[in-house]
Image (cartoon, coloured by chain):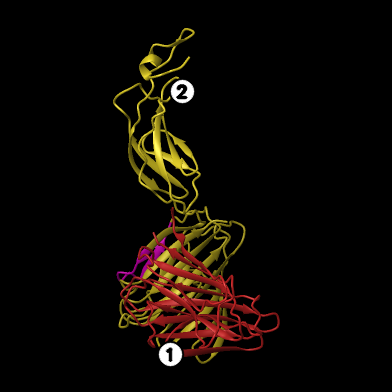
């Protein structure tokens, strides 16, 4: 039997089972890139048979996704440009052979294990706290550009709001002329950060990494690398700290109450999660 | 959570005549940038450096910690016309031993001067050094291009296979 059009199909019986009308091509909507995925919007045709499902198919790769608009197509290659067409299928699993027009081209992002959790700016606050940190990462990274709201000072880091003597740290510092080392046990904060005053266009920058922060059996090692250069002065330092608690770190507080006016409005602190 | 560590572009040296390459049209959509270089130079004791926005004036400076394997020091260089990406690369002149340099550039679109943190890892099986440095570019312009080049004058070239990748890091 040769099916020549949907009208003839409608009248065909397969045994005692009627075959539903074929579905006309839907109207393509916007495609939007995700991370190694994309969503594809469409509008079902008002003519032809009733579709029970819609499928989006990619070019290149013929990767498909099925569902209501917008359809999610997963398993795409990050960094590759894709377009999509959509077609409907009726209750008999038959489609008309007519696909929608091609969508706009999108390029899905490459998946990484480095994700942004939260960020904050200064605005004169004495403290900045990231709370409810998810325990789903292997480690955390904090990236900071620091400036005070008034005069130069220091800030310090605490975990889970604990200000008792459960911290210790070692420091290697260079001021452009000499190298100094120090180590302090039984401290009430993990790491000290210098903060530049707001009279210049410069800020201290730091990268802080916290390994196995969600461990419930081990103490947490924290390291930082940072400093400031002011074209004639400044310092650079490497610090290693220990948070002597076995509870998972669920909040981090950066306290600039030692400075004049707290964190300046241009200060930014961003928290990232790194999957293991 | 949003994915935020994205490769913007990678440059891989081919042939033996490359002295400089540039990442241009850097999108302003990230919070920070990270440039990762791993490669060699076909002669001894050179510095591979970066410049922002093709600025060749003496608007750069740095402070660093330096370990040579036998001693440590901290020094400072003001009013440079570049920022080192790797330093004293290829002591001995081998083209098969790469030097590894990373620069993290913070708030590269801000109206403030631009601070960056650099790490140099350069072991040559008996010689070499490790460095940590903080640098500044005294400009309030958004960084839209980064040029990687060999600072020494003369016929010095990147070894084939040297690579540099620029990443964008975006805060929530």
A218 in relation to A1, above or below: below
Q: Quadrant of the C terminus of chain B?
A: bottom left
Chain letter of the residue carrying label 2: A
Chain letter of the residue carrying label 1: B
Foreground disc of the pair 2, 1: 2
Q: Which residues are magenta?
A: A120-131
Q: Is residue A185 visible?
A: no
Depth check: give the residue in front, B133 or A148.
Answer: B133
For chain A, give the colour: yellow
Q: Name the residue tied to disc 2.
A: A93
Percent of width and height locating residue A86: 39, 35
Residue B78's tag is 1
Q: Residue at x 39, y 11 (%)?
A: A11
A222 in relation to A170, above or below: above
Determine the image quadrant of residue A253.
bottom left
Q: Is A233 positioned to the left or the right of A212 in the image?
A: left
Query: Separation of disc 2 and disc 1 at Cα?
Result: 73 Å
């Amino acid at each position: 039997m040769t099916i020549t059009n949907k009208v003839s199909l409608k009248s065909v019986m397969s045994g005692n089972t009627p075959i539903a009308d074929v579905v006309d091509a839907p109207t393509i909507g916007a495609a939007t890139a995700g991370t190694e995925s994309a969503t594809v919007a469409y509008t079902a045709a008002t003519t032809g048979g009733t579709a029970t499902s819609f499928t989006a198919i990619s070019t290149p790769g013929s990767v498909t996704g099925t569902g209501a608009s917008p359809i999610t197509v997963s398993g795409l290659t990050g960094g590759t440009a894709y377009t999509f067409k959509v077609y409907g299928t009726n209750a008999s699993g038959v489609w008309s052979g007519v696909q929608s027009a091609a969508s706009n081209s999108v390029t899905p992002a490459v998946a990484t294990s480095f994700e942004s959790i939260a960020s904050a700016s200064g605005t004169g606050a004495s403290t900045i706290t990231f709370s409810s940190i998810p325990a789903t990462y292997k480690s955390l990274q904090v990236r900071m550009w620091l400036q005070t709201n008034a005069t130069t000072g220091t800030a310090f880091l605490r975990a889970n709001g604990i200000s008792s003597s459960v911290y210790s740290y070692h420091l290697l510092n260079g001021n452009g002329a000499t190298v100094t080392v120090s180590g302090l046990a039984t401290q009430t904060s993990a790491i000290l950060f210098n903060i530049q005053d707001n009279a210049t266009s410069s800020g201290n920058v730091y990268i802080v990494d916290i390994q196995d922060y969600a461990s419930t059996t081990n103490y947490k090692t924290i390291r930082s690398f940072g400093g400031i250069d002011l074209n004639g002065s400044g310092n650079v330092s490497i610090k290693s700290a220990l948070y002597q608690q076995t509870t998972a770190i669920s909040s981090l507080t950066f306290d600039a109450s030692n400075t004049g006016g707290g964190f300046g409005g241009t200060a930014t602190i961003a928290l990232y999660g790194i999957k293991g | 959570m949003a994915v935020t560590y994205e490769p913007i572009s990678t440059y891989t040296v081919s042939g033996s005549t490359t002295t400089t390459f540039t990442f241009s049209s850097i999108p302003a959509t990230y919070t920070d940038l990270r440039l990762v270089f791993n490669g060699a130079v076909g002669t001894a004791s050179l510095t591979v450096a970066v410049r922002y926005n093709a600025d060749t004036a003496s608007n750069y400076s740095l402070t660093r910690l330096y370990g040579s394997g036998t001693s440590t020091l901290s020094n400072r260089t003001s009013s440079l016309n570049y920022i080192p990406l790797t330093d004293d690369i290829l002591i001995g002149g081998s083209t098969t031993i790469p030097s590894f340099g990373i620069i993290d550039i913070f708030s590269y679109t801000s109206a403030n001067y631009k601070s960056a943190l650099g790490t140099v890892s350069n072991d040559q099986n008996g010689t070499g050094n490790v460095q940590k440095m903080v640098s500044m570019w005294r400009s309030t312009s958004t960084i839209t291009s980064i040029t990687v080049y060999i600072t020494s004058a003369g016929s010095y070239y990147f070894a084939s296979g040297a690579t540099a990748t620029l990443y964008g890091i975006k805060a929530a």
